[in-house]
């Protein structure tokens, strides 16, 4: 897998959120032109993208803000919606991570739960209602 793409309205806020989560901004660019239209299946694409990389360099998120055609706003889906479910991140301290993400709009969907003596886990909503899962290995 090369990356996971997420469409957002506020690119700067999404970059700040994922930076706080420990990702690094790899680069930013504007995407437009016939090749982009043909690839995505839309006409007149013009969007700004930011590529975020995990610290180990093994995974990336492509954040995209569409200027044309305008992004279609939809309410945040519940966690059991068919389609892309969530993106999970391994963290060293789940409670510290939640505290650092709250000023960026993160809200817990439930509670921090412990799975046996192996993990602390939680789901939270990030920017644009994106569901993020956190996993802290404890065992």
Image (cartoon, grey):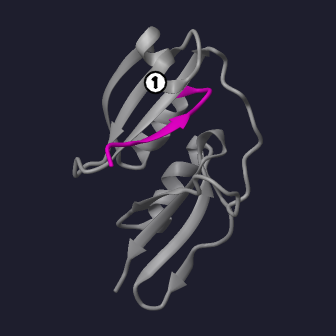
Relative to 121, does residue 46 appear above or below in the rendering?
Answer: above
Quadrant of the rendering where the C terminus is positioned: bottom left
Q: Is residue 60 left or right of residue 108?
A: left
Residue positioned 55% across, 56% down in the render: 86
Q: Name the spot of residue 73 as percent of width and height, x first.
A: 73, 31
Left/right placement of residue 22 relative to residue 122 reads left
Residue farthest to the right, as pictured: 75
Would you place residue 61 above or below residue 108 in this image? above
Classify mark 1: residues with Cα within 10 Å, few (<14), some (14-19) or many (20+). Answer: few
Q: Is residue 125 magenta?
A: no
Residue that protrudes farthest toward the left in the picture:
56
- In this rendering, position of residue 104 left or right of residue 23: right
Residue 96's spot in the image, x, y percent? 46, 62
Whether residue 79 is situated above or below residue 20 in the rendered picture? below
- Residue lying at the far bottom in this picture: please name it: 116
At x 48%, y 64%, the residue is: 134
Write down the region rendered in magenta.
1-12
Write the residue at 37% across / 43% down.
3
Q: Quadrant of residue 44?
A: top right
> Residue 35 lies in what quarter of the image?
top left
Q: How many marks?
A: 1
Query: Which residue occupies the foreground of this view, 116 or 37?
Result: 37
Q: Position of residue 97 (x, y in %)?
A: 46, 58
Return the residue nearer the eye: 43 or 73: 43
Residue 49: percent from the left, percent from the top?
Answer: 44, 24
Secondary structure beneath label 1: helix
Residue topped by disc 1:
39
Going 60% across and 47% down the picture, which residue do you hit?
A: 130
**Camera-side residue of 96 and 126:** 126
Q: With respect to residue 72, does 30 lie above or below?
A: above
């Amino acid at each position: 897998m090369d990356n996971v793409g997420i469409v957002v309205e506020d690119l700067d806020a999404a970059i700040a959120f994922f930076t706080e989560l420990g990702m690094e901004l790899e680069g930013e660019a504007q995407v437009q032109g016939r090749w982009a239209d043909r690839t995505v299946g839309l006409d007149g694409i013009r969007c700004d993208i930011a590529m975020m990389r995990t610290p180990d360099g093994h995974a990336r998120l492509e954040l995209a803000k569409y200027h044309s055609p305008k992004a279609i706003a939809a309410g945040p889906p519940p966690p059991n919606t068919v389609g892309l479910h969530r993106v999970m991140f391994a963290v060293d301290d789940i409670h510290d991570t939640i505290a650092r993400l709250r000023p960026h709009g993160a809200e817990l969907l439930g509670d921090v739960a412990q799975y046996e003596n192996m993990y602390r886990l939680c789901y939270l909503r990030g920017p644009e209602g994106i569901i993020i899962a956190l996993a802290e290995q404890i065992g």
